[in-house]
Image: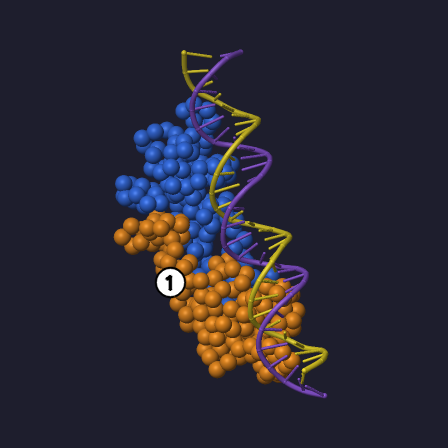
Chain colours: A blue, B orange, C yellow, D purple
DNA sequence: CGTATAAAAGATTTTAATGTCTTTTATATG
DNA sequence: CATATAAAAGACATTAAAATCTTTTATACG
């Protein structure tokens, strides 16, 4: 619920790179896609966006792949969401009305507003590092699809 | 955010019927679609589902249209959501992992769980009547698209 | 019964997210 | 420079939600 598949793929891909960064400098898309059981080329496009936004680094060619950069671990999840899904959802009416606002609220506006801002805050406060910091063998298990 | 357009159309359609039920017994799909600026035939299919689930009544032919029934006003919003979008979203992992659960949580499980249950509770507690009960002229304005 | 009305149902199209396959670009190394 | 590797880019296919158009079914009323 809430997010696209792309967002889930992105978060899991970034986490996988983070978890592997002790063992090897760079991780290839083939390995990520296989371990997470995610479509390789689709993940590739998403990872490409992630690199363009400086959330990860990548290099082509032999010994290339994806790697953490100095900022990766402090990136908040909402930044990843922005890249994959955009943030319009936080300002868009739950019933799809354009002119919904506090002065002219839709019928569910007042119910939805606190939920929306709680979600936004949770995603703003949680960083990649927060997710990587836990039990690593457990986490590897938990980002794979099986 | 959160929901499909179908859900928004359904809620607004039901509310429009509720608001008109003082003035006339039945409301036609042409009027609803026009006033809410929603595609008529698409709304028709959604309203049909709503009728099949006994959230509204409908009759064909002259003087036909959609009308409230004895249960309409006490229907919780989550029932409407179930009809239009289904409720799988409440049990589905935010990152799309099948085996995500409290014992093997995905990396955002503990952040998302309270938000999810808050949303579910809000939709379970809010009835159609709660939304109709407010200022009616204001509400009519607020469910139209303009 | 015949006719007009309005929902229901069916068929088709459009759009966006997702997924697959192929070609291009960059780079490390002999 | 030649070759192999791996990301990036491009073209195309699939799927589900959304939207449109046409035909069928039910019903009120003269």
Work out whether residue B110 can be spotted. Answer: yes
Q: Quadrant of the C terminus of chain A?
A: top left
Circle 1 crowding by C-alpha within 10 Å: few under 14, some 14–19, many from 20: few
Q: How many marks?
A: 1
In depth, the one of B128 and A125 nearer the eye is: B128
| Residue A69 visible at all | no
Q: Is residue A55 left or right of residue A138?
A: right
Residue at which label 1 appears: B117
Q: In the image shown, does A103 or A3 lie closer to the viewer? A: A3
Q: Position of residue A138 (x, y in %)?
A: 28, 44
Residue drawn at x 47%, y 50% is A4
Please give the name of the residue rendered at 54% of the width and 63% of the height, measured from the top-left corner: B6
Secondary structure beneath label 1: helix
Instruction: Please provide percent x and percent y for residue B120.
Output: 40, 65
What residue is shown at x 37% (from left), y 29% (from top)? A25
Of residue A144 and residue C22, the one placed in the foreground of this image is C22
The quarter of the rendered structure image containing the N terminus of chain A is bottom left
Write down the chain letter for disc 1: B
Image coordinates of residue B48 in percent, x first then y, are 54, 70
- Residue drawn at (38%, 34%) of the image: A31
């Amino acid at each position: 619920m809430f997010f696209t598949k792309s967002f889930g793929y992105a978060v899991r891909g970034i986490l996988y790179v983070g978890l592997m960064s002790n063992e090897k400098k760079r991780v290839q898309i083939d390995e990520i896609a296989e371990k997470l059981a995610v479509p390789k080329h689709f993940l590739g496009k998403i990872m490409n966006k992630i690199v363009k936004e400086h959330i990860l680094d990548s290099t082509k060619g032999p010994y290339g792949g994806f790697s953490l950069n100095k900022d990766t671990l402090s990136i908040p999840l909402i930044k990843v969401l922005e890249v994959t899904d955009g943030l319009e959802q936080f300002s868009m009416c739950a019933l799809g009305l354009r002119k919904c606002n506090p002065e002219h609220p839709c019928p569910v506006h007042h119910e939805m507003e606190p939920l929306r801002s709680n979600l936004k805050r949770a995603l703003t406060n949680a960083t990649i590092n927060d997710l990587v910091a836990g039990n690593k063998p457990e986490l590897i298990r938990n980002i794979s699809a099986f």
